[in-house]
Structure formats: structure tokens, C-alpha cells
Image (tube, rainbow, N blue to C red):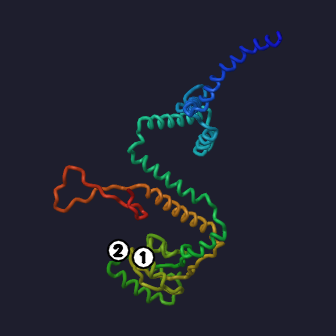
Amino acid sequence: MRLSAVADAGSQPMIERSWRRRPLLAALRRWLREPLLHFLLLGVALFAVYGYTQRGRGGVESSKQIALSLDDVRQLAMYFESQWQRPPTPEEFDRLVENKVQEEVLYREALVMGLDKDDTIVKRRMAQKMQFLAEDVAAAREPTTPELKSWYEQHSEKFAQPSRFSFRHLYFSPDRRGARAHDAAVKALARLTGQPQEAKLAASLADPFMFQDYYRDRMPEYLGKEFGPQFAQAVERLSPGSWQGPIESGFGWHLVYVDTVIPGRVPAFEEIEPDVRTAWLGEQKALAWEKAYKDMRAKYTVLLPAPPDAGSTPAPAPPPRREIPSLSGEVLQ
């Protein structure tokens, strides 16, 4: 009986302490389930992470660090060597690094001052980068040989090789002969009938020409630039093996002896596969850029001032604006 009484007496304070803890535990559980507490703890964690990331080596803010990678350093040395055909000395390398640092410092300070805003050159450069990015997406995919062959069959006319002409000509100068240049060429042609192209008589009948007397394997495009389109078209119609003319050019009158004609043709795919690949990539880049711009353009509405009425006095207030539809034809609000 005494032991039981003692045990009851000793357990009483423990029971009381247990009852006192229960409200504290219940309150703690309620606090742990509170969304506000979770939000505060998350904010503290994010603040700590942000503060850590904004510190670089040596406790310096990352925005104030200029870190050159190993690739940056190698490029500086390679650029110097490509110009001077030797590696830079330690002093020259230090200057290269300092020039790079100077460029980065000035760039960052210019951004802080807002010098990139409303600058036509900066805008144009950024626009070019956007175009290059869109084109690079198309260039990232390598075409297969069957794909190139199929594309070549549909665009073979782009790779057609024009005819080539080899010929000798005799020149009759209007500066020397005046209006008689054409008649002199007609008389010379009569004397040269049946004569070979390298006959000594031929050279004695003509005037000196500032360029070549003989042209080998020339395309009509070249002849058009050299002598004029009319001359190039006339040469294309000549038959090889005899003196013919007179043909007028931008220089005067000519007698022409065509000795060789290489007919134009469409080459086989295997002959020009690298050229076909280059043309295919060019088309894919153009299509990728067109689609990318169309998607970007559809996000914007362009407002322009309406044209003033004829005869009306322009008001000092800004004119009303009208909406310009996107490339898809929809007017964006």
C-alpha cells in the first residue's frame, strides 16, 4: 500500500507536465502547417541563394567581375599569331588581355549609361543577330544524299552550264575610221572569205584593240560585260569555222572567227553535289528566316500617321494613326 501511494504521488507531476506540453505541441503543429510560414522560409532561402550567387571569387559581386576563360585567352593568342605569324611575347600578351578587358569595361559602363538605347547601329546589329539565329536553325540539319538528289531534280535549271565560245576577232575603230569603220569591216570580210583565222592578211586589215584579240572558252555573260549584250547575242548565233560579221559592240565593229563552241548542259548530280548542298542550305536558311520573321511580326501592330487630305492645312496636333496588318493578313489588336 505504501509503495502504491508513493508511485501515485511521483507520477502526478509527470502527468501534469504532459498535459502542459500538449497545447504547445498542438500550436507548433498548427504553425508548421501555416502557408505563411512556408512562404517566409522560402523567401529567406531564396534571399540567401541570391546573395551567394551575386558574390564571386573573393567576395566581389559577379557583375563587377570580368572573367576570361581559357578559350578567350587562346583566341587572343591565335588572333595575334594569325596576324604576325609568331606567338606574342609576354608583354604583348598582357596588352592583348588588357585591350580585351578595356573593351568589356567600356561595354558594361555604356550599358549602365543606357547608350545602347535608340542607337541605329546597335538596333541593326541586334536585328542581324536575330536573323543569323533563325538561319542557324536551318543550317543545323545535314541533308541526306537522296534528299539532295530530289531537290536537285526540281531545281536543275539553276545549275545549267551555258555554252562557251572560243573566237578571234578583228577590230575596226570608229575613232580612227569614223563613219567608214563599218564599210571597212565589210570590205575586209570580202577579202578574208575562205582564209584561216590566223592568216597574216587578217591582222593587216584591222586596227589595234585595247584588250585581247583571242578569247578562249568565254560564256555569253562574260561577253556581254566585255563587249555589250548585242555583241554577245550575235556571237551565240555564229557558226564555227569562218570569218563573219560585221558585229557591233560598245567599242566599234568586229569581224569574228569562232573556232570552238562547247554546248551548254545540265551537269550530273555527282559532279556538283557540294554546290547542290550549298544551294539547298541557302534555300533552307531563307525559308527558316521567312517563317521566323512571320511569327515574330504577327505579335506586333504597326501604327503609322494617316496621309493628310489634299488641300487641308496640316494641324499642329499629331495626325491620327492607322493599323498595319501582320503578314498573315490579320489586324492585331
- Point 56% across, 73% down: residue: 159
> Upstream in the sequence, badge 2 or badge 1?
2
Give the CA separation, mark 2 to mark 1: 21 Å
One can see residue 291 in this view = yes
Position of residue 226 relative to residue 15, above or below, is below
- Circle 1: element type: helix
Q: Nearer the viewer, residue 293 or 74?
A: 293
Residue 155 picture quarter = bottom right
* Of 107 and 42, the residue lying toward us: 42
Task: State the image coordinates of residue 157 (x, y, percent, origin top left).
Answer: 54, 76
Q: Quick one: label 1, few (<14), some, or many (20+) residues within 10 Å?
A: some
- Give the residue type at disc 2: Asp
Is residue 55 visible from the viewing direction of this image?
Answer: no
Q: Is residue 219 left or right of residue 206?
A: right
The vertical placement of 239 against 298, above or below, is below
Quarter that holds the C terminus: bottom left
The reply, left or right, for residue 64 in relation to residue 314 is: right
Residue in front for this viewpoint, 235 or 29: 29
Residue 281 found in image quarter: bottom right
Q: Residue 231 at what x, y percent from top left?
A: 43, 78
Q: Which residue is mark 1?
A: 229
Residues at circles 2 and 1 in contact by the CB criterion of under 8 Å: no
Identified by mark 1, the residue type is: Pro
Location of residue 268 with respect to 306 vertically, above or below? below
Q: Residue at x 55, y 29 (%)?
A: 61
Locate residue 152, reporting x and y percent: 60, 73
Residue 170 x, y percent position in the rendering: 45, 79
Which quadrant of the figure contains the N terminus?
top right
Label number found at residue 175? 2
Q: Is residue 144 left or right of residue 114?
A: right
Q: Which disc number belongs to residue 196?
A: none
